[in-house]
Amino acid sequence: MPALNVTFTDEEFEDVRAAAAAEGKSLKQYVHDLPLRERQRTVFVRYAASFGDQHRAEFDEAFPDEVPPSAGHGTEAA
């Protein structure tokens, strides 16, 4: 099984150890899970942005007084 050695400063290591303890995980499990959670977060953000883009017209129609509308109006110079 592949392994990875990661170097931390003493301060960084203590921060990671504290974060692991706060989640009730071992240091090894916490560091293992970090990139997996980041990947899930990235997928979620990508989907959420896509969903927002797909439904922007519906939102603008339902909430016409929101600023700025997606049509790009409201940014003209006075």
Image: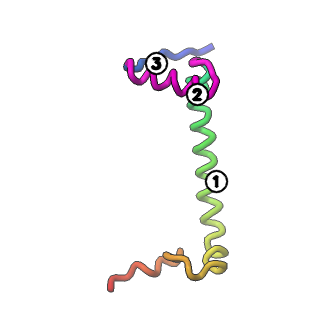
Q: Position of residue 4 (x, y in %)?
A: 52, 17
Secondary structure mostly seen in the magenta stretch: helix
Query: Which of the marked residues, 1 or 3, is nearer the chain's N terminus?
Result: 3
Q: Position of residue 46 (x, y in %)?
A: 59, 52
Please say whether residue 61 is one of the residues in the magenta stretch.
Answer: no
Q: Secondary structure at mark 3?
A: loop
Left or right of residue 14: residue 65: right
* Alpha carbon distance from label 2 to label 1: 29 Å
Nearer the observer: mark 2 or 3; the answer is: 2
Q: Which residues are magenta?
A: 10-28
Q: Amino acid at mark 2?
A: Ala
**Which quarter of the figure is the C terminus placed in?**
bottom left
Left or right of residue 61: residue 15: left
Q: Amino acid at mark 3?
A: Val
**Residue highlighted by disc 1:** 47
Q: Amino acid at mark 1?
A: Tyr
Q: Position of residue 11 (x, y in %)?
A: 39, 22
Q: Residue at x 60, y 65 (%)?
A: 53
**Which quarter of the figure is the N terminus placed in?**
top right
Q: Residue at x 61, y 71 (%)?
A: 56
Instruction: Check residue 22 in the rendering and tell me which mark sits there, or answer none.
Output: 2
- Disc 3 residue crowd, few under 14, some 14–19, many 20+, Cα 10 Å: few
**Residue highlighted by disc 3:** 6
Query: Which of the marked residues, 2 or 1, is nearer the chain's N terminus?
Result: 2
Of 75 and 66, nearer the camera is 66
